[in-house]
Amino acid sequence: NAGVTQTPKFQVLKTGQSMTLQCAQDMNHEYMSWYRQDPGMGLRLIHYSVGAGITDQGEVPNGYNVSRSTTEDFPLRLLSAAPSQTSVYFCASSSDRSGYEQYFGPGTRLTVT
Amino acid sequence: AQRVTQPEKLLSVFKGAPVELKCNYSYSGSPELFWYVQYSRQRLQLLLRHISRESIKGFTADLNKGETSFHLKKPFAQEEDSAMYYCALRIGGFKTIFGAGTRLFVKA
């Protein structure tokens, strides 16, 4: 099993550009989520999904969109990148079968100039 | 409001010394708490969860509902324990919130 995969690993955007961060898992987990990690602020929940076709907002959803068309994939879209979105983004998946343990991807380091 | 607080951003101890990483939570429901660890150049991974009452790599954590705390402890720190530690709270369903994290540095 590859677990949770994320692409790309690094990305540099100019202000106003849009892009999609990819996340996939092969563990058949119902729950997937996106976090951003900023120094001194820990991990903050952006959006999450409890199954295909179902998404909801987390703590810091503004400027981001998500969709969940399949169980495996949960892409995060930045609509119009801003320097405040410079961060490390983590995707995670979970299941009640695993006791709600979050399995994390390797992260995407995004810089917006 | 639900919240996880880790008051120390950085904790520095000598090898062989005891270590305690503090975590306090605010939640009106029945809490389910976790500790996650991120070693250098590795993914975030689960260290332990309170319902298992387990000891992993010598670390233990006890849920104290009266003090709303879930501190992580180890009697003798090792250099390989140096990492970023996050306390996390499951707040119903699958949703999990994290604290700001504590960087532990174990000096030789």
Image (cartoon, coloured by chain):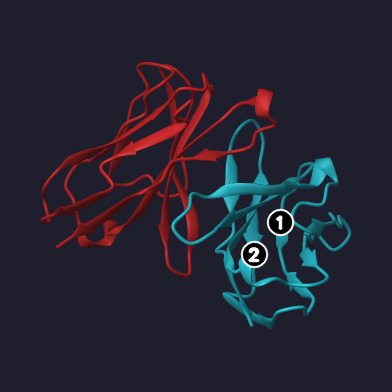
Q: Position of residue A88 (x, y in %)?
A: 35, 55
Label 2, on which residue?
Answer: B5
Q: Which quarter of the rendered picture does the C terminus of chain A lie within? A: bottom left
Tell me if residue A56 comes above or below residue B30 in the rendering. Answer: above
Query: As drawn, is A78 to the left or to the right of A100?
Result: left
**Quarter of the image where one finds residue A54:** top left
- Circle nearer the N terminus (1, 2): 2
Query: As drawn, is A18 to the left or to the right of B77?
Result: left
- Of B40 and A64, which appears nearest the observer? B40
Q: Are marks 1 and 2 on the same chain?
A: yes
The residue shown at (79%, 42%) is B30
| Crowd class of label 1 (few under 14; some 14 to 19; many from 20; radius 10 Å) | some
Q: Position of residue B46 (x, y in %)?
A: 63, 46
Q: Are marks 1 and 2 in contact (CB under 8 Å)?
A: yes
Q: Colour of chain A?
A: red
Q: At label 2, which amino acid type do we have?
A: Thr
| Crowd class of label 2 (few under 14; some 14 to 19; many from 20; radius 10 Å) | some
Q: Nearer the viewer, mark 1 or mark 2?
A: 2
**Quarter of the image where one finds residue B32:** top right
Q: At label 1, which amino acid type do we have?
A: Ser
Residue B26, disc: 1
> In the orientation shown, which residue stands out farthest toward the front?
B108
Q: Which chain does the numbered disc 2 sit on? A: B
Q: Colour of chain B?
A: cyan
Q: Position of residue A6 (x, y in %)?
A: 34, 38
Q: Which chain does the numbered disc 1 sit on? A: B
Query: As drawn, is A67 to the left or to the right of A92?
Result: left
Residue A11, disc: none
- Of A22 and A47, which appears nearest the observer? A22
Tell me if residue A72 comes above or below residue B21 in the rendering. Answer: above
Query: As drawn, is B13 to the left or to the right of B58?
Result: left
Q: Position of residue A55 (x, y in %)?
A: 43, 27
